[in-house]
Image (cartoon, grey):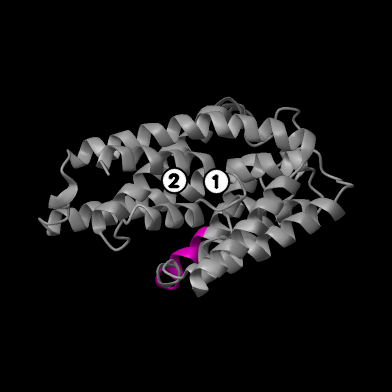
Amino acid sequence: MSPYIVSILLGVVEGLTEFLPISSTAHLRIAEALVGMDLKNDYWKMYTVVIQLGAVLSVLVIYGQRLLGYARSFPRGVEGNRTLPNHPLSLIAIAFLTTAIPAFLLEKVIADKLESTRVIGAALLVGGVAMWIVDRLCTRPTVKTVDGMRPLSALWIGAVQILSAVFPGTSRSMSTIAAGQVIGLSRSAALDFSFLVSLPIMLAACGYSLLKSLKDFGANPAFLPGSLHANPWAVLAVGFVVSFLVALVVNRWFIAWVKSRGFAPFACYRIVLGIGVLVWAMR
């Protein structure tokens, strides 16, 4: 299969799944296995980071105006009733630091678990069940917007988000959304905060991984696979652009869907896919 076709397919998978609560890691691992990609190849590791960055930048486009509003109103807020600890930007920073520090320290554990399809299948299944239960039981929110959140809420969401860093297949968005609903956030508030906190978390993770990959590239002349039969940088660019455009469309749709209909279809999909992955792994 042409490297460009592979790049388009993986870019579509990444753009579709990065911010849906169904785990982009699980879907990329499945897609990579189906096209026969060598998961340990340094080039394709870098490629995965690049297309993830494309999906992340789509969130910046969608929430850019809101973030500018937060920046202009810092620290008193738009209505002048916020303080430094409970301003939305501070809440995002609290959740980011709560997740980022343990995730960095557990990097080796995370890397080892990425290779286990059984872990991914189990995380998909358990996360789907948890998501379905939370969406069915937590139907009386007390916090309707991100502006109404408190520092302890951000701390809790950041702590739960560590699960998605340690166990691929959990889904960062699933863990943050469900964690928010459990403590009284509305679907809309939990979804918005999940997207907003994804920006520093994922930009930091992508930046760190990309710097490591580029360092390896400089030290290893064989970093770019000779069997690619295509311009490796063009392959990267195709995946990045496709991932960005697909994520932009899908994320806008997802936000509108969830605010009116909830997460049940995504929970059911996770459960079915998780069972399928576990059966496949055991075979």
The location of residue 63, given as percent across then percent down, is: 58, 30
In the image, what residue occupies the spot 44% across and 45% down? Answer: 203
Q: Amino acid at mark 2?
A: Leu
Q: Amino acid at mark 1?
A: Ser
Residue 170 appears in the rendering: yes
The location of residue 178, given as percent across then percent down, is: 72, 54
Which mark identifies residue 262? none
Q: Earlier in the sequence, mark 1 or mark 2?
A: 1
Q: Which residues are magenta?
A: 100-109
The location of residue 163, given as percent across then percent down, is: 59, 65
Above or below for 76 versus 165: above
Extreme-front residue of the structure = 283
Query: What separation in Å lies between label 1 and label 2 (alpha carbons)?
Result: 8 Å
Above or below for 138 versus 256: below
> Looking at this view, is 9 or 25 the one in front?
9
Q: Magenta: predominant secondary structure element?
A: helix
In the image, what residue occupies the spot 40% across and 33% down? Answer: 242
